[in-house]
Amino acid sequence: MPFKNVMDTIMGGFHKKMRAVGITHVSPLSDEESFSERTLPVPDPKSNELLVQVLATSVNPVDVKMRSGYKEKGDFRIFGLDVVGRVMAMGQDVSGFTVGDRAYYAGKQQKQGADAEYQVIDYQMVAKAPESLSDSEAAAMPLTAITAHDILHHGFSLPVEKDAAKGQSLLVINGAGGVGSILIQLAKYMGLTVIATAGQKESTQWVRQMGADFVVNYHDDLPTQLADAGFHQVDYIANLQDTMTYWDAMVQLIRPYGRIAAIVGSTLPLELGELKPKSASFTWVFMLARGNNDLFLSEQGQMLQQMATLFDQGVLHSTVTKVYAGLSVDNVRLAFQDVASHHSLGKVVIDVATNGAKAKERNKD
């Protein structure tokens, strides 16, 4: 064996290791072996990347969807898009960060995820974490905050500024979920009157706590309930639940020249022509499109920095409702179960830093 190969093999044995939880195949979440743990090399950051020690991560519906659609049987796949962590190393082209910074971000869908002790990420997608939030509170927010911002700015063409939409109305379908919870808060900051859907006593209380002015039951006829509340039409509709099921109601409720934005795909064609008589607009919103296409990455970092300022000013509040302590197979599986049930309020977080002391000791070796 050539000398260089021998040295590479020897040095490889000294490479720092990390724990990660993922899958090699899809099985029911009720299966205790639906996730597994592996020890992997800590990734090296490229010239434009940060190496981040993951302190906390959250589980989103898109993680559940990615897991259920996984087809590369045998390859170890790590999920997890939301991160708050500590910058441990940087590539030569990185600017705006220093080692030791506490940062938060939502990662790229095609890359290995954050259910691990370390991750690399393009620095343009990252912002310094809100100082006023704990690790768990901050980890709950990146993906949903970016999505809410995209709905308001790209979907509705509104500036995300104080009182920028004062006097206008917004219907949020699925107000108690992760996106709905922060969207309501941002919309109120912008001066919108918010009507949110909820189905249970707990979710009704939750959306009111987030700032909703009116709450309607998604089990019942929405146009009738909105009319009873004094809204025959609304300026904007954010569909965060089921685009096809609520299509007819949205067509009826949107005002002329109004805007509808949806984050959930449809398995059937939408009759967009039904919006023409009102000259109303419909937009898909998918915040992961930036990372998937390597476009407008710095916009994501800028949005997160704006959100961090609003969190620190007390304008916005974290939507975390449940925290699992420690990165483990059981905790990841249970967190996925919570989100897959479609009954969880706000966000579910995994506090990875609980294992931080063990990781530090292991990397001394």
Image: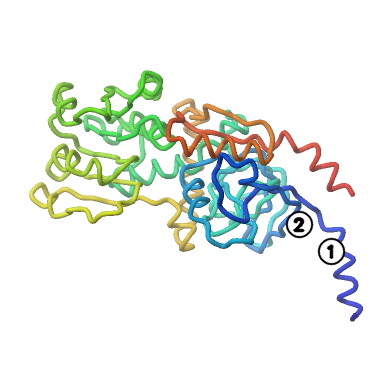
Q: Nearer the viewer, residue 340 or 203?
A: 340
In the orientation shown, which residue stands out farthest toward the bottom?
2
- Up/down of 27 relative to 130, above or below: below
Q: Nearer the viewer, residue 335 or 260?
A: 335
Image position, residue 167 (x, y; %): 22, 29
Relative height, residue 258 to residue 228 (above, below): below
Q: Residue at x 84, y 48 (%)?
A: 363
In the displayed structure, does residue 277 sit left or right of residue 241? left
79 w.r.t. 327: above or below: below
Q: Are marks 2 and 1 in contact (CB under 8 Å)?
A: yes
**Which amino acid type is shown beneath numbered disc 1?**
Gly
Determine whether the residue tagged by mark 1 lies in a helix, strand or loop.
helix
x, y percentage for residue 287?
Answer: 42, 50
Dividing the image into 4 quarters, which one contains the N terminus?
Answer: bottom right
Horizontal side, residue 335 vs residue 232: left or right: right
Q: Secondary structure at mark 2?
A: strand
Q: Is residue 292 left or right of residue 91?
A: left
Name the residue: 19% across, 30% down.
221
Mark 2 vs mark 1: which is more N-terminal?
Answer: 1
Percent position of residue 199, x then y: 33, 25
User: Which label belongs to residue 225?
Assistant: none
The span from disc 2 to disc 1 (Cα, nearest Å) is 9 Å
Question: Which residue is located at x 43 percent, y 31 percent?
Answer: 343
Q: Which residue is mark 1?
A: 12
Q: Nearer the viewer, residue 12 or 188?
A: 12
Measuring from the top left, give residue 238's x and y in whole percent: 29, 40
Marks counted in the figure total 2
> To which quarter of the image does residue 30 belong?
top right
Query: What residue sits right under mark 2 in the picture?
Result: 41
Which residue is rendered at x = 59% and y = 29% of the image? 323
Name the amino acid type tagged 2: Pro
Q: Is residue 353 left or right of residue 264?
A: right
